[in-house]
Amino acid sequence: YFKPAPDGKVSLRIRKNKLYGRDSERSLITSTFCRVRTSGKSEALLIGGYSGSGKTRLVENILKYIDGISCLVSSHKSDESSIPAITQALDQLCASIKNSCSEDEYLRINSRLMEAFGSDFSILEQVLPNTKLFHDTKRAKPVASKHQGSEIQSNSVSYILRLFMRAVSSQERPVVLFIDDLHWCDATSLEIVYDIVSDKKGSSCVYFLGCFRDNEIGSEHPIFQLIQNMNRNNVPVQLLGLSGVNRNELNCMTSDALCILPRHCKDLSDIVHSKTKGDPYFALEMLSALVDRGLLQFNFPKRRWTWNQADIMYLDDTSNVLHLLKGKMMSMPTQMQTALKICSCFGSGIDTRLVRCLSDSVEYSGLREELDRAVTVGFVEKAGECYKFVHDRVKEAAYDLIDEKDKERYHHQVGMVLLTSSSVDDSLVSIMIDQINHGVGELIQSEKDRVAIAELNYKAGVTAMTHSGFVKAFSYFETAKSLLPVNHWTSQYYFSIRLFLSFSNAAFACGYGDLADEALDAILREATCLEDKLDAYYFTNNLLFHRGQTKAAITKCTEVLSGLGETIPTKVDANELNDMLRKVMIFFASISDDELIHFKECDNRLHFYLMQFYQQRVWFGFFGDSPAMQSFLSCRSVEIAIRVGFCKYTAVSINSVAALLCGMSKDISTGYRLGRISLSLLTRFNATNLIPIVYLGFYGLVAFNSEPVLHCADQLHRGFQLGMSVGEPTIALMNGLHYIQKSFVGGRNLVALSTEIDYQLELIETHDDNRAKRFMSLFKETLHMIIDKNEARMDTTTLSEGAEALDEAMKIEGFSEVVFFHRVIQSYWLGYADRCHYFAQKSARGDAAVGRLLKLIASFYHGLAALQILRKKKSKVEMKEIALASLKALTSASDLAPINFKNKVELLEAELYRTEVVLRGNEEDSMQAKKMYAKSICSAEAAKFDHEKALALELAANFFEEKGEFASALRNFSEAKLHYTLWGSKVRVAQMEVAIARTEKSLTR
């Protein structure tokens, strides 16, 4: 076992890969992994302990056995890098997928990623650069936007990474994420961890492991907030504390190192345990130190290790492992000590590219050779393209070689040496500036040098923002600001504007709203012309709107447009508006689709800004303007585009006109044509960031007039996902609301929709969007009433009072009409025809807040309820007029989109014939009713409307029951029950069960 080295020395037989005394901890980690894989539910396990307690070795020892066999594993050691550790770990996961998955599995993951991100894959690449490994050559190359690096914010990154995890993880192959040194992570990074593990969609399967030094952090550290959040939201999380090994376990470790029986070395291991408190790493270092000092020697005649117990017992300088390591390092040549100092300045290790850059200097020319010698000695190991310390304690000891008072200067000096190297490329700027920033305020006095360092900090900040390192980016921009001269608004004018704008973006992304406002105010105060203020104004307006200050945002935006030469009237003249719309329509009629799509491009910067602010003003106006003002703004923005040329914002303007035409039912065919053209303009200008707002307008307000409503729902879901990804939560959540709306109208499963609503409500809470919360909560209430009969208590007094009690703010936003729409739907499906009629009448007196589609749906159910009332109360002849008006509106809609409305027209016609049979007993009407019921059932099936197929079957069954055709009634009731079950309505299923029992009883008579 003990072969002497050339120098005659014998080394200890240290078994680095063996764990001592961690059986229960191993069992906990592996059993949790098995539970995650069995249940398909994500869990987290956090391991606390002091440095050297064996946390990392414990986890890595387990991961090496499961990596690539039954899961995907990615691990990363957190440090003070500008890129969050969780992002780096997931970026490494991409390489793991490529290397460890079979071809079929890789293709499946690739397909799911493309399905989740589609042509917007570049957004994912911005956060996780290694996703280029899944590159589709047909995909458009990402184009840097004017605000590249500032569009994606922390909440957006969380959403992007959740989508990514849903695509790459599964119950069959869960993802294990291991972050070492979790205590270095900031609150933003840990919030991303929480969002991934607690994903309410439940479609990702993640086992998160994190190690941290619990003795070096206080109760205020974000790690404990992470644990609290998980516990509060019922996310399985376990906290494991790791202390030193006990005497018996350390005895086994010593026995293995000395290759003698445990009982023969117990006296030695007891001494080591008392001095190290069972710290495994400290214990091994102490044994090595005893060998170096000759207190633990190999006796060749006896062929065993020997020691003097008393000499070791009374050693007084082995109470600290750092002292041992530092002493060992100080015995090395000065050149190696310098190499270790430099390496420690970069954290846990140093990239070989940095070694090459530093070696360019005379001072550090022998750096590589000294690091190689450090590898031989055992301080450092070569891992790929990096020299890494073998343990954190070694790094700490090396860093301790630098005098405390000299550390800032030492870092700064290393950074300045890098600055002089010609080998430093853009990828190393952030690392270099991290070194320079130590003591930069005091060590750099020249104004020219300070500005140069400020520009490097700005560059590093932009890079950090691009990779979602918002906290680090904020630090870079803050340092850059501190280095500017007092007169920087004069001497560094344009750089100051860029810096302060980026600073405000980073501050907002980190949640420092006041600092973002201060930076924007400084630009607006110091900039010398309107053009230089426009970016600041645009961001200021968005901040106001995000905070719910819609009126203030509209006022500011109107002021900017006024400064750009535009006059926005306080009140729109109807004749002027009609004249504007007529001119715009003449232009669109005079030009082909291809000519529109390839219309001349705007080449003037101010004109571009003009259309950008019009787009912003139109969006704000959606929440605070009259329909007439919205129409004016849409038409005016198109007029400007026709005059100065098209840009990406023209897609929004044309789309707004399309929505206007369809909403006012003026020219739906032209509206649909313009909507399709707006989509083509997005492609022409590669305007990924505008897809959410254009999809909201087109698929939310226009496309259902021609395309299947369920297809519109799917596209709105894409708009929701993309909006969350690019940092537009308000627009994203509006897409989400319309997705729920179209999915409900299309008859998708109510339980699945309810789950989706809960998920979106969680996002709404995160973004504090009370506007979206109101509307989404109404849908949740409606779904719950239709799903569960125990919740379906239709207290008509409460409903009526609830609608009347809406405050003025809700009425201004059209919220009361939306409430009445939901009451119409709830009343009809719960069987309250009179209540349905009552609320439909109140809804009809409102404005167009619910939109054309929901008005058509409300009209449909109102028509059915009116006929039901007429059959019961034959004197209510006005009810027939209501049904005929509903039929007329739906027939017009069906002419354009039969897939969405034909079944409704046919069912209303069937019910009209049925009513005529009840009122007059005409047999010919009876035959027509049966015919139209059959047609409605077939049309609903073709449209995949389970709920309306079930309704047609139920109403047909009621008709057959009235006619005494009980066999046909029973068959239709039974089939209706099946489709109500598929829809997820327990209320309607229960009603069908009663009807089936009643019909079966009639058949046996």
Image (spheres, rainbow, N blue to C red):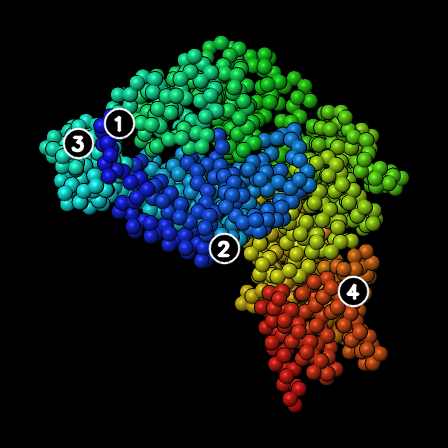
Give how far across and how far down residue 16 sits, in percent: 31, 39
Give the label, 4 or 3, closer to the camera. 3
Give the label, 4 or 1, closer to the camera. 1
Image point (62%, 40%), residue name? 135
| Separation of marks 4 and 2 at Cα, in angstroms | 47 Å
Q: Which residue is mark 2?
A: 172
Image point (30%, 51%), residue name? 24
| Separation of marks 2 and 3 at Cα, in angstroms | 53 Å
| Separation of marks 1 and 2 at Cα, in angstroms | 52 Å
Q: Give the amino acid type for the residue marked by disc 4 in the picture.
A: Val
Quarter of the image with the C terminus is bottom right
The numbered mark, 1 or 2, whose residue comes first in the sequence reads: 1
Q: Give the amino acid type for the residue marked by disc 3 in the picture.
A: Gln
Q: Which residue is mark 3?
A: 297
Report the residue that reaches farthest toward the left.
310
Give the label, 4 or 2, closer to the camera. 2
Left or right: residue 172 compared with residue 125: left
Give how far across and how far down residue 36 sits, in percent: 44, 54
Circle 2 SS class: loop
- Pointers 2 and 3 in contact (CB under 8 A)? no
Judge by depth and name the residue closer to the eye, 834 or 1002.
Answer: 1002
Q: Which residue is mark 1?
A: 6
Report the residue that reaches farthest toward the top.
446
The image's mark for residue 250 is none
The image's mark for residue 905 is 4
Give how far across and how far down residue 336 sits, in percent: 34, 20
Q: In this orientation, does residue 736 appear?
A: yes
- Pointers 4 and 1 in contact (CB under 8 A)? no
- Pointers 4 and 2 in contact (CB under 8 A)? no
Give the label, 1 or 2, closer to the camera. 1
